[in-house]
Each structure stands twice: as C-alpha cells, then as structure tokens.
Image (cartoon, helix red, strand yellow):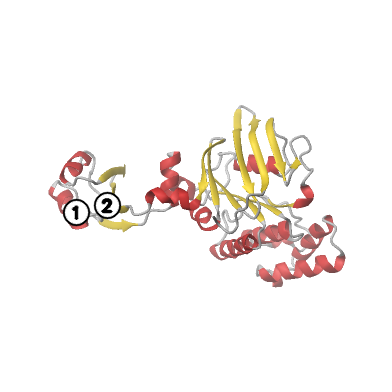
C-alpha cells in the first residue's frame, strides 16, 4: 500500500448526477478518496471533470446523488465543508487590478489569517513559485504561466486539508508546469488530500496514487496506477512507419510471425506487440518484400497512455492536442 493511502475516507461520492441542457454532464458516478491520497480524474474535454469538481467544491448543486467531505454531508448544503478546502479552478478567479501580493493577502484574509501571518505566507509562496519579483506587479499583466502559479498559491495559502486542482498545468509553459508539479508532489508528501483533474496522461501517471478514467460523464475504470500498469508489464512493442500502404498485411504478418499482435493504427503506422522481444530486422525485411517502404522502426515502452486507449477507446493524441478549453461541460 502506498504510504499516502489511508483507510480514512475524506471524500465520498455516490451516484452523482448533473444535467446541463440536453447533456448528462455527470451520469451516476461513485468514488471515494482516502486521507492523504492524490486522486486523479483523467479524461478528455467534455468528459465531466470540471462539472464534478464544481459540485464537490460547492459551486454547483447536483441533480441527484450524495457528497460527503470529511464526514460532512454537502449534498444539500454545498458549502458546508468550505473551510477545509483549497480550490485552484481551471480559469483564474483573481483580481486583475490587484498585485500578486495583494491577491494572495486578500485570499488569506478571507480564511481569517491575521495580517502578519498572511503577509508572511504570501511572500513565501511568491518566492517558492518564482514570482517574488512580480509580487508588486498587477495580476492583469502576468503571463499565463504566472497567472496559473499565482492561482495555485491563492488556493493553498490557508494550508487546506483538502485541495482541488482543476487542470492546473493546461496550456502553460514547461517551466511553470514543472514548478506546479513539484509543489503538488510536496503537498502530497505532507499528506494533503488532493483531487486532480487533468487530460495530461503523463501528469496523472507521475503524480497520482489512484486514477479514475472518465468519459462522457461516466467513470469507466478506477484503480491504483501500479494496478493499471500491471497488465502491460513485460510487453514488448515496436512501431513501424511506412509512407506506403500497409493495409492488408496484418494476416500475412500474423502467419509469418506467430505470437505477434499486429495493429494498423492509421495509414502508414503499424504497431506490433508481443510477450517476447520483437524481431525488428526480420519484420522490416518481410514488409519490404511485400512492397512496403519502411521509413522508421523503433522499440517503445508501454505506459499509462496505452492503458487509457485500451480502456476508453480514445486515442491519447486527441488528449494531447486539447490545449484550449472547448465549450460545453468539462
């Protein structure tokens, strides 16, 4: 068992539902999150991630189902556990006319921190996130990465027991994303309970204890990261690219190389899997003998991305291209 997991249930959701217009944005989902756990919601835009987090944090009332946070029934009183929560929304809710320091101080004051303590925490967080020199500049003039880092600081300045992060690194620069991931990992080490939504598979694999795959408002799989990865351990993969047609060669390949699983991903890209090392040289020669011009053949390491594709049927490339938010439920 991960040292971060606990039998103590901090978040409990049962048969949660929310309809937005004609769409079942959240369609009967149930899950629990343990004390100190970093629980990930992984799915494409439109899957229901933001709608779920809005209900859990009291911004939206569910149509049906129950929500309990730290033993408090929040179903009918959505903000009953507000004092325990920190929230970093997918879009900034800070004030453009205030400086970074003033925004953090204001947020801390809302949680009842005294002046000396809130100013000390604001300065410390600005320094830790590389924003010390920008602390006295107005928030409206910040870059996107700086805005996300300040929003993160505002969500944790009161040191909440439970932290909700909605797509915290979407669309920002690499350096800012790395800083935020380091801060998230640090809070996890200090046993903060964290609920993270993301469509970045690598981020979920790197940070989370458990992950829920959510598609079209429904959870299709929940498991620990190591258990999700277990079926692909020891699998060998080769991906072959060819500018010429590979269609129709699967049956011939399977007959010539028993034990290989051959899949044509799209025109010109062939994926080959096996429980033993794949013979690249003989494969390339076979394809060339059958009229295919091979431009690349490379061995690959299977990852959570492959598990996600197998469970959901959604190509991971579609998630990576979602840099900007789309309309409708998220």
Q: How far across and how far down the image is residue 92, in percent?
A: 69, 52
Q: How far across and how far down the image is residue 315, in percent?
A: 42, 44
- Quarter of the image for residue 208 reads bottom right
Q: How far across and how far down the image is residue 240, in percent?
A: 27, 52
Pointer 1 residue: 284
- Looking at the rendered structure, the secondary structure element under dot 1 is helix
- Whichever of labels 2 and 1 marks the residue nearer the N terminus, that label is 2
- In three-dimensional space, the C-alpha distance between marks 2 and 1, rounded to whole angstroms, equals 8 Å
Q: How far across and how far down the image is residue 52, in percent?
A: 64, 40
| Labels 2 and 1 touching (C-beta < 8 A) | yes
* Mark 2 nearby-residue class (10 Å; few <14, some 14–19, many ≥20): many
* Mark 1 nearby-residue class (10 Å; few <14, some 14–19, many ≥20): some
Q: Tell which of 119 and 223 is nearer to you.
A: 223
Residue at the image position 20 percent from the left and 39 percent from the top: 251
Which label sits on residue 240?
Answer: 2
The answer to whether residue 265 of the structure is visible from this angle is yes
The answer to whether residue 136 of the structure is visible from this angle is no
């Amino acid at each position: 068992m991960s040292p971060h997991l606990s039998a103590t249930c901090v978040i409990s959701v049962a048969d949660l539902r929310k309809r937005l217009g004609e769409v079942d944005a959240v369609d009967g989902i149930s899950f629990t999150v343990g004390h100190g756990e970093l629980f990930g919601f992984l799915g494409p835009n439109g899957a229901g991630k933001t709608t779920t987090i809005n209900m859990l944090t009291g911004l939206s009332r569910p149509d049906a189902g129950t929500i309990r946070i730290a033993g408090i029934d929040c179903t009918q009183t959505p903000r009953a556990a507000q004092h325990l929560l920190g929230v970093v929304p997918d879009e900034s809710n800070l004030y453009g006319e205030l400086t970074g320091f003033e925004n953090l101080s204001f947020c801390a004051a809302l949680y009842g921190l005294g002046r000396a303590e809130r100013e000390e925490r604001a300065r410390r967080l600005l320094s830790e996130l590389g924003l010390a020199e920008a602390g006295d500049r107005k928030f409206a003039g910040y870059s996107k990465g700086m805005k996300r880092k300040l929003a993160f600081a505002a969500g944790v300045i009161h040191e909440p027991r439970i932290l909700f992060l909605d797509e915290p690194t979407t669309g920002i620069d690499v350096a800012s994303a790395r800083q935020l991931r380091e801060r998230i990992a640090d809070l996890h080490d200090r046993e903060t309970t964290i609920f993270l939504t993301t469509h970045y598979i690598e981020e979920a694999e790197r940070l989370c204890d458990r992950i829920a795959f959510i598609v079209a408002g429904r959870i299709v799989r929940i498991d620990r990261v190591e258990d999700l990865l277990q079926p692909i351990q020891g699998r060998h993969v080769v991906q072959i690219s060819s500018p010429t047609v590979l269609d129709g060669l699967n049956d011939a390949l399977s007959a010539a190389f028993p034990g290989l699983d051959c899949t044509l991903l799209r025109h010109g890209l062939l994926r080959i899997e096996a429980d033993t090392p794949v013979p690249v040289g003989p494969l390339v020669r076979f394809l060339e003998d059958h009229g295919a011009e091979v431009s690349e053949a490379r061995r690959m390491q299977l990852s959570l991305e492959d598990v996600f594709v197998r469970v959901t049927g959604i190509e991971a490339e579609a998630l990576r291209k979602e840099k900007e938010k789309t309309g409708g439920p998220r």
